[in-house]
Amino acid sequence: MLECGMQERDRVALRKTSAILCKEMVVDELLVQSLQAEDILTESMAESIMAQTTSQKRSWNLLLLLPKRGPRAFSTFCSALQDTKQQHLCDLLTQSPERDGMERSGERFVDPPPPLSTQEGIPAKRARTQESMEMSLDADSPITTPVLPCTHDFYLSHCQQSYRMSSSPRGFALVISNVTFDPCAAPDLDTRKGGEVDDEVLRKVFTELDYPVTVRRDLTAQGMRACIEAFCRRPEHQTVDSCVVCLLSHGVEGAIYGTDGQLLQLDWVFQAFDNAHCPLLQNKPKMFFIQACRGEEMDCGVEQIDGPARTCSPSCEQLDAGREGEGDAGSRPRGEVGRPRIKLPQRSDMICGYASLKGTAAMRNTKRGSWFIQELNTALRLRARDTHLADILVQVNRHIKEREGYAPGTAHHRCKEMSEFTSSLCKEFYLFPKYQPQY
């Protein structure tokens, strides 16, 4: 088997010279592009490095990434230093006493194998298979670059055709993260190691985007239902412009597991926020992010919502129209919202990002969290300032796909799955981070 990471002598050389490298190395576009051209850095990694505000921070960010990028990373990095007229730093690395000592001793160091696979979607009593697993592979630490702010000119040029996003806070966010499952009630559901990283990443990024975040961990299916119902009823929704719901757990197509091994149907979740059941959020964008597998095995009832009835896409609006006689907005009480009764689709103004395609596994690292949440965090921090949310999710999809052949030249599992999203947005949806209109 090929070595899965950078050789120990190269790791030591980087670590011993890191102080000098951070002080003297120039990390510019040419150096980063050289590493990107050799598949040592992905596009999102390059963007996160160049987004750092100082040369020292860019250097430190790069040095943190390199040991995780496979056995070719060291030699390629040295070549890039030569190409950018930093030969003295290349010599410093290759002539390191620690490196020479290890080579003379004839020792061979091999990094430990990547963490074992952990399952994200396991139908009850079903043998575990590659297709039903959420794989846990090596990945990159979530970036902590501050959310880049929207500019005044960009806001003025896009606010007229976009959803109103000027309230402070922008809205409220709910994160439900199931990490530990009841070994008696759900013996087939493993602990989602790394899941606690995801909910903290989401809490931080949405807080910076001006969303007060409520994080609830390890809920049963009924507990999740009660938590979502309480969140939907919050009267404060009337004074804000949007909302966010993130669900992280094991799952199957159309549903996620509670810690008791019972399923919560995603169609019920979307219904709880539709125009009939959550009038305070009518005409306001609602974001959903689902980190769970979407395996092909389903319990009773899941097939009924597999397809248009499950999604928030225009095809789902056709289904809502078909149910108009029994559950449309006009047949329900107006509640406390002082608006005229305007005919609305049952389900609109929603966008939902899934960690994987229908019937496939999601990818999660047991120490650094899931690929989908990592990429979503990066894209929101770097791109929310000037990018439509649907385009952000397209970028997330592309970057997850780039992880195929992750850590080039190694024996890592090759990720063949991608994320996807559905949308019933009626306007353009920009988050306009850190911008407050002046009236």
Image: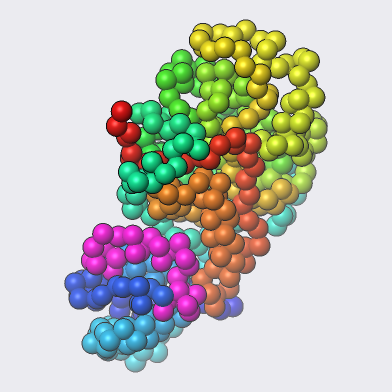
**Residue located farthest toward the bottom when viewing the structure as drawn:** 104
Q: Which quadrant holds residue 327?
A: top right
In front of the other: 250 or 311: 311
Which residue shows up at 58% across the image and 70% down it?
A: 405
* Residue 413 on image: x %, y %: 61, 66
Q: Does residue 42 belong to the magenta stretch?
A: yes
Tell me the quadrant of the picture where the N terminus can be found. bottom right
* Residue 354 on image: x %, y %: 61, 45
**Image: 357 above or below 335:** below
Give the left or right position of residue 420, taking residue 140 as reference: right
Give the left or right position of residue 376, taking residue 353 as reference: left
In front of the other: 178 or 162: 162
**Image: 17 above or below 290:** below
* Residue 49 on image: x %, y %: 35, 64
* Residue 90 on image: x %, y %: 29, 86
**Image: 50 above or below 14:** above
Count of numbered circles on the image: 0
Which residues are drawn in magenta? 34-59
Give the left or right position of residue 89, taking residue 328 as reference: left
Q: Can residue 136 be seen in this view?
A: no
Q: Which quadrant holds residue 321?
A: top right
**Image: 408 above or below 90:** above
Give the left or right position of residue 336, taking residue 27 as reference: right
Which residue shows up at 40% across the image and 89% down it?
A: 106
Tell me the quadrant of the picture where the C terminus can be found. top left
Which residue shows up at 62% across the image and 45% down it?
A: 421
In front of the other: 310 or 425: 425
Q: Is residue 339 visible?
A: yes
Q: What colouring does the structure picture have? A: rainbow
Magenta-highlighted stretch: main secondary structure?
helix
Q: Does residue 21 belong to the magenta stretch?
A: no
